[in-house]
Image: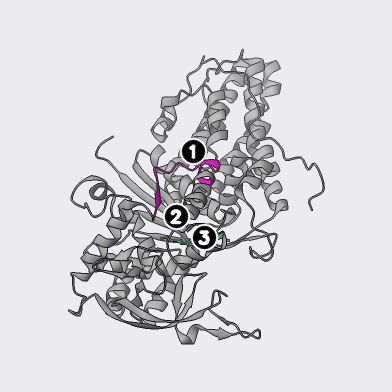
Amino acid sequence: MSGGRTYYLTTPIFYVNDAPHIGHAYTCVAADALARFMRLDGARVHFLTGTDEHGQKVAKSAEAAGLDAQAFCDRVSQNFREMARLMNISNDDFIRTTEERHIRACQALWRAIAARKTPKGRDNIYRGTYAGWYAVRDEAFYGEEEITLGPDGARRAPSGAEVEWVEEPSYFFRLSDWQDWLVDHYEKHPERAAPAGRRNEVLSFIKGGLRDLSISRTSFSWGVPVPDDPQHIMYVWFDALINYITAVGYPETATGAFATFWPADLHMVGKDIIRFHCVYWPAFLEAAGLAPPKRVFGHGWWTVEGQKMSKSLGNFIPPRQLVEQYGLDPVRYFMLRELPFGSDGDFSHRAVVHRINGDLANDFGNLAQRVLSMINRNCASRVPAPGTLTPADEALLASARALHARLSADFAEQAFHRALEALWQVVAEANRYVDEQAPWALRKTDTARMGSVLYVLAETIRHLALLAQPVVPQAAAKLLDQLAVPADRRDFAALARPLVPGTQLPKPEGIFPRYVETAAPA
Ligand code: ME8
């Protein structure tokens, strides 16, 4: 495909200090649903995920594992790659910050920023000494006023991470000179930081006054060397954010992927890292003369059975465990349906089972199964021919046909829960229609009318299956197979190409099995 609409979206690159858990899977699934939606909608998509491998946190984890840092990163990065495969993530690229292409991009961006002046005509980068608090867990610097002293004598950042005093020579990025530009940027383009509540947090943080940012470290060496001064390595967040442009070929900007895909359409991140993405990142880019991203969405935080996930509680759920227990598509559905995208939520066994047995098995699964079995038994397994349509038929088809526009608007705002709610409203409408039209009774009285009813239902289910693909790709594919929809008629342009009467259908099979409790949950 050449020309046309493009869409570049990214997940955070995950620290390789630990095993992937449901939080990481969540961000990937949300971004994946959007990437799939955009592809089906005809856009040329570039979808990036990967791993963040430098910095003190990773260096310490490697040391604790008794491994050389690179060997440790190779091993843990692979776990994230496998997590992406497990969750059926359709990323086009997987970036690692220890790759050569990335080191080259970091050094080029550093030079580009250093070569330009701030809006106040000063150097963007200067040398000094950092003396202040640092939290290795967050890989973040904190001001004195943000630190609290706990009863245990430990000093903590607002995130709860312990901080340590750091004093070392450092290069600084003159962030303070970019404050007015950043305020103006978000006032002119409010959609660039979402949801609105997070944008307000970002704006008040900026308006509260920005301090210059330390962007190099000298007390350890696991990082990208600063050009012309390799005693310094780049601050891990400076290095990490650059991955988004490395992956589109920076420093080559005039042609190739950068020219096609930059600025990114969306950086999907968790709310914990919104400040890095909405304050530092646009400032770095603007300072280098590059366009800032079009949007950053900071989604909410999952707890598990009402508790924060933590090492000490040992309640990090590995994605593999979820998929084995509930099935992949049900987990993807649950993650995107259970809570308004942007809000926090709780991952509980009860809630997952409720969604599986309610929305998936009873509502959608049962609708498809009922309709397809009736066609199988009563229409010789062929798509029936519709007769003259009644107002009830037209109403259901109109609801199904209106879905694409509705979902496009919801996906454009990352309102996945609203999109799914809209799909399931049509599922419910179709279930009511089956009950009202009672095709099983028509079988004895009016087979032509029965054919019309089953046709309307099958065509509605085709719409639902096509539009559910981004969220439940495997189940939707199975359903489209059962409707004998050819592979080249599964994009959204094919919504306008109705089922052809007479088409032979395979034997129907359930797509969303019920979850049966085998033992009482622990
Ligand atoms: O921050 N609920 O990496 P990280 C929801 N390397 N999402 C969660 C979550 C939870 N409980 N826990 C984690 C980093 N996440 C940096 C990013 S990007 C240039 C560098 C998800 O491994 C969420 O997306 O700590 C969060 O932002 C991310 O994992 C943090 O991953």
Mark 1 vs mark 3: give the one in front: 3
Residue that label 2 marks: 70
Residue 467 disc label? 1
State the extent of the magenta-drawn residues as a range: 83-97
Whole-percent x, y for residue 269 in the image: 46, 59
Quarter-of-image position of residue 518: top right
Quarter holding the N terminus is top left
**Residue closer to the observer: 440 or 500:** 500
Above/below status of 33 relative to 465: below
The residue positioned 48% from the left and 57% from the top of the image is 68
Is 170 situated left or right of 58 in this image?
left
Determine the CA span between mark 1 and mark 3: 44 Å
Residue that label 3 marks: 62
Q: Which of the two labelled residues, at mark 2 and mark 1, occupies the earlier sequence position?
A: 2
Total numbered circles: 3
Above/below status of 29 relative to 232: above
Q: Which amino acid lies under the numbered mark 2 shown in the image of this protein?
A: Gln
Residue 353 disc label? none
